[in-house]
């Protein structure tokens, strides 16, 4: 953020809000247009978060994001990874700690996405029990062998697919009920 210097080196009210909340400013029209579709809403928020945090999603996540921002960013990662290759791909691509070793599943549960939180917790237990073996650097072919070695992840992948749309809708509805925690709408 470029800091504006004002008289007596005071911050403007917008800078204070930004620093305190670290929330994006989104117009009512933008928010209204995106709010009918879960992923349109998520992408609107996520794109604004990444602008604020000055980073590309592939580079990692910024520690200054709050729990709501981290949870939505983590959900985006979880959804993308599991729908493209399951929990084993998520682990292989280096996201295990961000998904399993944070308050992510607890926050999803608090938001009402209990089925998703339960699946994540079960995946975390399998991961933690087998972390050393699963996290070994592997080729794509070697990664494929893990799917047969850990069929319990396959089962969780299927459970994820079964609830992913309904739980995504639950998360969207939480955001709509708690908009002030995700963005400043003006």
Image (tube, rainbow, N blue to C red):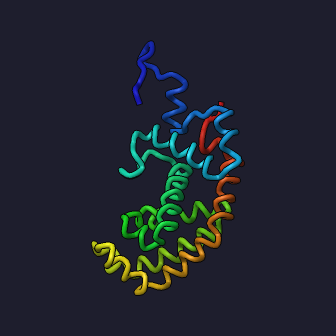
Task: Please tell me which residue lies in front, 98 or 83.
Answer: 83
Quadrant where the C terminus sits is top right
Q: In this rendering, does residue 103 appear at all?
A: no
Q: In this rendering, does residue 93 appear at all?
A: yes
Q: Is residue 135 toward the left or the right of residue 23 in the image?
A: left
Residue 123, above or below 74: below
Quadrant where the N terminus sits is top left
Q: Residue at x 45, y 12 (%)?
A: 7
Q: Residue at x 56, y 44 (%)?
A: 45
Residue 43, above or below 152: above
Q: Is residue 30 toward the left or the right of residue 146 in the image?
A: right
Residue 22, above or below 121: above
Q: Is residue 44 toward the left or the right of residue 138 in the image?
A: right
Number of numbered labels in the structure image: 0
Task: Please tell me which residue lies in front, 133 or 23.
Answer: 133
* Quadrant in the rendering for residue 166: bottom right
Q: Residue at x 55, y 65 (%)?
A: 105
Q: Residue at x 44, y 15 (%)?
A: 6
The percent position of residue 112, horizontal first and vertical second, equals 68, 62
The percent position of residue 107, horizontal first and vertical second, equals 58, 60
Report the residue that reaches farthest toward the top. 7
The percent position of residue 24, horizontal first and vertical second, equals 55, 37
């Amino acid at each position: 953020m470029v800091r504006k210097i004002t008289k007596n080196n005071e911050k403007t009210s917008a800078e204070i809000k930004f620093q305190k909340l670290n929330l994006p400013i989104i117009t009512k029209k933008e928010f209204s247009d995106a709010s009918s579709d879960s992923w349109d809403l998520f992408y609107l928020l996520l794109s604004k978060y990444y602008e604020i945090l000055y980073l590309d999603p592939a580079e990692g996540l910024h520690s200054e994001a709050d729990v709501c921002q981290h949870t939505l960013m983590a959900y985006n990662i979880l959804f993308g990874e599991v729908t493209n290759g399951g929990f084993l791909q998520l682990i292989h691509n280096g996201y295990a700690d961000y998904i399993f070793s944070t308050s992510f599943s607890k926050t999803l549960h608090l938001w009402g996405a209990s089925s998703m939180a339960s699946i994540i917790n079960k995946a975390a237990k399998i991961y933690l029990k087998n972390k050393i073996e699963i996290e070994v650097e592997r080729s794509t072919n070697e990664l494929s062998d893990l799917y047969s070695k850990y069929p319990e992840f396959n089962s969780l992948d299927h459970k994820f697919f079964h609830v992913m749309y309904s739980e995504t809708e639950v998360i969207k509805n939480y955001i709509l009920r708690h908009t002030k925690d995700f963005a400043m709408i003006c």
